[in-house]
Amino acid sequence: MIDASGQRAPTGELVLSLQGVSKHFGAVSALTDINLDVHAGEVVALVGDNGAGKSTLVKILAGVHQPSAGTITFAGKPVTLSDPATALDLGIATVFQDLALCENLDVVANIFLGRELSPLKLDETAMEVRAWTLLNELAARIPSVRIPIASLSGGQRQTVAIARSLLLEPKLIMLDEPTAALGVAQTAEVLNLIERVRDKGLGVLMISHNMEDVRAVADRIVVLRLGRNNGIFYPDTSNQELVSAITGATENAVSRRAGRRQAQQEQREGGQL
Ligand SMILES: Nc1ncnc2c1ncn2[C@@H]1O[C@H](COP(=O)(O)OP(=O)(O)OP(=O)(O)O)[C@@H](O)[C@H]1O
Ligand SMILES: [Mg+2]
């Protein structure tokens, strides 16, 4: 579907919608009047400079922080995410930047950490089968599910953390800097994996500082600046334009973008393109 600005409009159902969400920590306004939508089968990148409020937003959606104001609608209903268990139960999964994996435990144990099947008598075979199924769905390259996390590469660890977040079949998955510590090949693999998660029909909210990764995988790019919305962009946006919105080199990035589109349109109509 093409919207008025010539971009592909999201076609999946609206999974998450934030309206006027604010968060104060004492006198500090971390977020002010944030609006944000994520649809099923869509990757939304959340970008912004250090301190822009990205992690605060993710923590609100993970049930770690409570918003000071605003409404969160999830799967069509207004929700209160009073703690992490509530967010998880509703279908909001989070892969935090530190991944929270146990180095000395194997892949299966990490995927099921705290959620072991029949906990009184651990059903190791069922857990192993389920772990392989999850990893295969992601076409993940893990040599064995019985090796400790300590012996996996950064990309493989990220894969295990993502597989783990899919265990409870969420509708939305949030990834905080999933490629930050990875090399080129591992980054490509994790980006492929994010596409596979999207193609399963999940909504994906990804925080990243890497504009190349963002452009490679995001369907929409939401910029935060000083805790406020500062424009929604598409992967065809130039680096310069994104950086301006992030740093505030142009205060009104939205109107600047509209201006550029209009100029392009006029050029096309003039037969120059
Ligand atoms: N628990 C807290 N108590 C007080 N202030 C906080 C708290 N958490 C975040 N802040 C403040 O809120 C603002 C936004 O921080 P946040 O961590 O959300 O930014 P960020 O966009 O994730 O930055 P980075 O890219 O550096 O991770 C900052 O000014 C920060 O100091
Ligand atoms: Mg952060």
Image (spheres, rainbow, N blue to C red):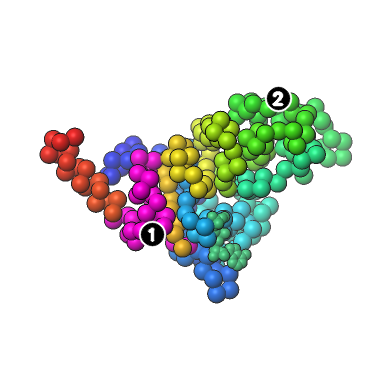
Q: Amino acid at mark 2?
A: Pro
Residue occupying the point 52% across, 60% down: 51
Residue 146 location (% of width, % of height): 78, 29
Choose top left, top right, bottom left or bottom right for residue 138.
Answer: top right
- Can you give x and y, in whole percent of width and height, for residue 212 in the image? 45, 40
Whether the residue carrying mark 1 lies under 8 Å from ligand 1 is answered with no
Amino acid type, callout 1: Gly
Relative depth, front residue between 59 and 187? 187
Screen quadrant of the N terminus: top left
Please tell me which residue lies in front, 271 or 164: 271
Residue bounds of the magenta highlight: 227-255
Q: Is residue 223 magenta?
A: no
101 relative position to 188: left or right:
right
Q: Residue furthest front?
A: 183
Residue located 65% across and 37% down the image: 154
**Badge 1 is on which residue?**
248
Ligand 2, seen in the image, is in the quarter at bottom right
Identify the residue at image location x=55%, y=74%: 27
Which of pointers 1 and 2 lies earlier in the amino acid sequence? 2
Q: Is residue 223 left or right of residue 28?
A: left
| Disc number for residue 143 | 2
201 shown above or below 75: above
Dot 2, how many residues are within 10 Å of its Cα: few (below 14), some (14-19), or many (20+)? few
Seen as rendered, the residue at the extreme left is 270
In the picture, the disc for residue 271 is none
Q: Does the segment drawn in magenta span residue 249?
A: yes
Q: Residue at x 31, y 38 (%)?
A: 2
> Where is 133 relative to 28, above or below?
above
In 3D space, how far apart are the residues under numbered discs 1 and 2 (Cα atoms)? Answer: 45 Å
Callout 2 secondary element: loop
